[in-house]
Image (cartoon, grey):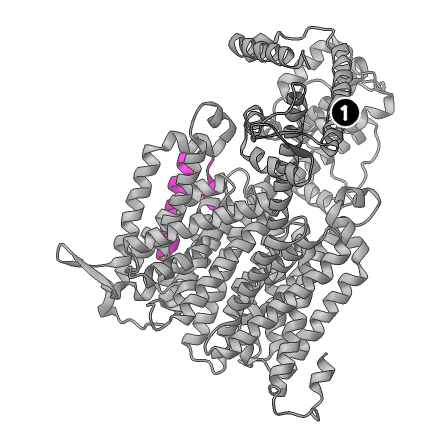
Amino acid sequence: MILAVADPSFPSGWIPPYNTLVVAAGVASVGFAAGVVGCFAVLRRRALAGDAAAHATLLGVGLAFLLGGGRRDLPLLLGGALSTAIAALLALVLIGRWTRTRDDAATAIVLGVSFGAGITLLSGISARGIPGSAGLEQFLLGHTAGLTAADAMILGALSLLTVALVALFLKESTLVAFDPLFAAASGWPVTLIDYALVVLVAVMVVVGLPAAGAVLVTALVVIPPVTARQWTDSVGVMLPLAGLFGLVAALSGVAVSSAVPRMPTGPLVVIAASILLTISLLIAPRRGGLARWLRSRRTVAAWADGRLLEVALRLEAQGPFTREQLLAKAPGAAADSAFERLVRSAAIEPVVTRAGTPAWRLAVLGRELAGERSRRLAAWTEVLEAAREDARGHLTIDVPSPEAILGAARMKAIRESAAAARSASGPA
Amino acid sequence: MMEFDSTHLWMHFWAIATAATVSAGCALVGSFLVVRRLSLLGDAISHAVLPGIVLAVLAGGRPGGAGVFLGAVVAALVTVWLTNLLGTHAGLAEDAGAGVAFTTLFAIGVVLVSALASRVDIDPGCVLYGILELVPFDTVPILGLEVPRALLAAATVLVVLVVAAALCWKELVFTAFDPAAARAAGLPVGLVSAGLLVATSLATVASFEAVGAILVVAMLAVPAAAAELLVRRFHRMLVVAVALGVAGSIVGYLAAWHFNTNAAGMIAVVLGIEYLLAALLAPGDGIVARVLSRESLRWRVACEDRLASLWRAEEGDAAALAPRTLLDRLAQARLVFGGRIGPGLAGGLTDIGREEARVIVRSHRLWEAWLGRHVALPLDHLHPPAEWIEHHLGAEVRGRIAADLEGDEGDPHGRDIPPEGVPSSLADERAR
C-alpha cells in the first residue's frame, strides 16, 4: 500500500500530494494495528491500564525533547513516550504489590499524576520559549498535519511489526486471554505473556500518539475491538475486523482534520470509531439491538400464536367460536395480531352462519399446530413431573416447613391458585 | 504562562484559595469514591462533563453559572447511563464500557470547542489542564471585595458537599462499607449512589475551570488514597485527605510559580509526591516500616542463631563454625560490640552472652520436647519448627511448656534442656 503511493512517477493532478498520502497510509496502518492489539487489551480487561500508560506518555515526550536538545525528532520523542508508558505500568504493578491501595485508585493515581507531570514539563518548556517546542502540543490531542512522510513510514513499520508479533504469538495470547488458569496449568508462562501483551498495548498507545493524542489514544485501542466483538464470536475474525474498523476510523479522522483548519485529529478519530460502534450495536447480526428486538418480537409472537391455538382448540369442543370469545379467553396485547396472523396463515378458517356473522373454527393446519403444541407441553410436563418425583426422593430429612419461609398468607395463596389450576385443567 | 510581580500578591492569594477550595471538595468526594472502589468514576465523569459544559455555554449559560452545572451533571449521568447500557446490552466489561463512553463524550466536547471556538469562550487548553493563573481576573464583587467567580463557585459547592455529607453521614458510610447490609437494613442504596454521582459531578465541574478535566482525577483520587494509607478510621481519613489536598494545592501552586510552569499540573505532581511519601512512611504498614520490621527480624534471628550455635559448641566442647554469610559476619560483629562475645576471632561467649544463648537453646529444646510428646512427629521433623519458634517464645510460654513436660529433663534427641536464665535485653526485645 505504501509502495503504491510512494511511487513519485505516479501521475499527479487529482490525487492529493505525496506527503498527505504517505501520512494517511501510515495512520491507517496505526489504526489497523491498534485495533488488532486492542483486542487483547479488551479481552484481558486491561483497557484502563492502557489509559494510564497513555496519559504518562506526555512526560516522556517532554523528557525526550529536552534530552535531544530541542529537536523534534519523532523516533526520539516516541522512545521517551514508551519509556514513561512502561514506567507507568510498572508503577501500577508496584502500587498493587506494596500498598493497600486498590486497582481503581492506583490507576487514577498513576493517570492523574503522570499527566500532571507531563503538563508541568511541557508548560515549563513552552514558557521558556525553547525553539521547536510549539509542535509538542500535538501529542496532547493528536495532529497528523505535522507528520512528515518519513515519520509516517516509521509509524507504519512499527504498526506492522506489532501486528506481526500478535500473529506470531496468536495461540499463546488467545489462550491466556480466555483461560489463564488452564494456560498456567498447561505450563505456559502466563505472567510473562500477560506482561508482554501489556507492553505491546503500551507500544501501540505510543505509536498511536501522533494520530490520537495522549488523552484519547486509548479509544483507538478500545473502541474498534469492542465494535468487532459485536459481529463475531471468533478471535480469528475479531482481530482483522477490529483492525479494519481501526483503519477506517483513523483514516476518516485524518481526512476530516485535514479539511478543517485547527481541528485536532484525535477527537475526530474517536468520534469516527464511536459512529462505527453505534452502527454495530444497532445492526450487528445476533448481538445487535435490531436483531435482539426482532428476536424478542418473534418469541412474543410465537408464544401468543401458540396460546391462541390452545384456547381455540378448547373452545371448539363446543362448536365454532367468535373472535371476541377467543380473545376474551386469551387476553394480552399480542393476541390481537396473533389472531390476524393465524387467519392469514389459514390456521383458522371462517364459518359464515345463517345470520351472516362470521364465526371461526380451526383448520387442519391449526389443529395440527395446536396438537403439536399440546404434545410438547405434555412431554415437558412429564419431564418436570419426573424431576419432581426425583426431587421428592431427596426430601427425606428435616426440610423446613414452607410456611416458615414463605409465610402463611403466601402459602394459602399458592394453594388456592394451584387448586384453581387443577379445576380449570380437569375437564379438558 | 502569566508573569506576576510581587505587587500582585492578591492575585496569587486568590488563585491559591481557589485551588485549595477545589481540592478540599475533591478530596471529600474522592474519599467516598476510593473506599467504594469508584475512583475511575471520577475519571469518566471529568472527561464526560466537557460536552455538557460546552453545550450549556452555547445555550447562553455563563461559565461557572448554574446552567453550566446542570449541563455537566446531565452529561455525567449520561456517561454512567451509557456505561451501564454498554454493560447490560452489549455485554461489555465495565472498564471497556467506561473507556468507550467517556472518550467518546470527551471527543465530542473537544470537537465542539474547536469548531465553535469563536462562539464559545472556552480555551481548548483549559479543558485539559485548566488555567488557574487566570482565575483571579474574572471576579464578582462581594461585600466590596473582588472575589474570583471560580472561587465563589468552588466554595458554594464545598459548602453543599460538606452539608450533604454531614446530613447523610450514616447512610453514606454504611453504603460505602457494606452495601448489601445497607440494602437489607432498608437504606435507599441506589439513591445514595446516585447522590454520590451528583456530588462527584459537582466537585468536577467546580474544579474544571481551575484545573481542567484530567487533573481533577488526581485531585479526587490521590489525597484520598494517600489518607487511606495513613489512617484506619474513615472520619480521620476524610480529614487527612482534605488536609493533604489543601496542602498539595498550596505547595503545588507556589512550586509552579517558582518554576514558571502550569499550576494545576504541578499540584498533581505534589499530590503524587504526597502519595509516594504516604506509601513509604505510613506507620505500621508503610513500605519503610515493613522493610524495617522484616529486616530487624532477620537481624535478630541472625544474632540469636549465632549465639545459640556458640552455646552448642561450648556444650559439645567443640569449636563453633565460623560465620559464613555477610549477615552472619555482621551479627558476629554486633555481638562482639554488644559484649555478648569476647573479642578476637576465637572469642567465646561472655557471661551475658551465655545467659541469652541458654534461653534460646532452652526455647528450642522445650519446643522439640513438646512436639515430640504431643504431636508425634518423627525425630528428624522436630528441628525445623523449633529453629523458627525459638526466636518467638516468651518466658511465660516457656514456663508453661516446662510445667507440661513435668520435669522431663531431656529433649527427644537426648540432650539436656538448659534451665531458665535471667531475662536479658535481647529477651526483652523478643517479648515485645
Percent x, y of residue A359: 60, 29
The quarter of the displayed image where residue B234 is located? top left
Task: Tell whether position B233 is magenta.
Answer: yes
Left or right relative to A34: residue A131: left
Percent x, y of residue B318: 84, 32
Residue nearest the observer in this picture, A296 or B391: A296
**Residue under the point 63% across and 39% down:** A341
Helix, strand or loop under label 1: helix
Give the magenta-colored segment's residue range: B226-250
**Residue under the point 74% across and 31% down:** B308
Left or right relative to A115: residue A282: right
Q: Indicate the quadrant containing the N terminus of chain B: top left, top right, bottom left or bottom right.
A: bottom left
- Most frequent secondary structure within the magenta stretch: helix
Left or right relative to A243: residue A117: left
Whether residue A198 is visible, yes or no, is no
Q: Indicate the quadrant containing the C terminus of chain B: top left, top right, bottom left or bottom right.
A: top right
**Residue under the point 42% across and 55% down:** B49
Residue nearest the observer in this picture, B391 or B196: B196
Question: In this picture, is A199 found above or below A3?
Answer: above
Residue nearest the observer in this picture, B284 or B205: B205
Question: In this picture, is B352 found above or below B298?
Answer: above
Whether residue A342 is visible, yes or no, is yes
Residue type, mark 1 in image? Arg
* Residue indicated by mark 1: A375
Chain assignment, label 1: A
The quarter of the displayed image where residue A212 is located? bottom right
Question: In this picture, is A250 found above or below A116?
Answer: below
Question: In this picture, is B428 found above or below B115?
Answer: above
Task: Tell whether position B284 is magenta.
Answer: no
Count neighbours of disc 1 (C-alpha within 10 A) and say few if under 14, some if 14 to 19, many if 20 or more.
few
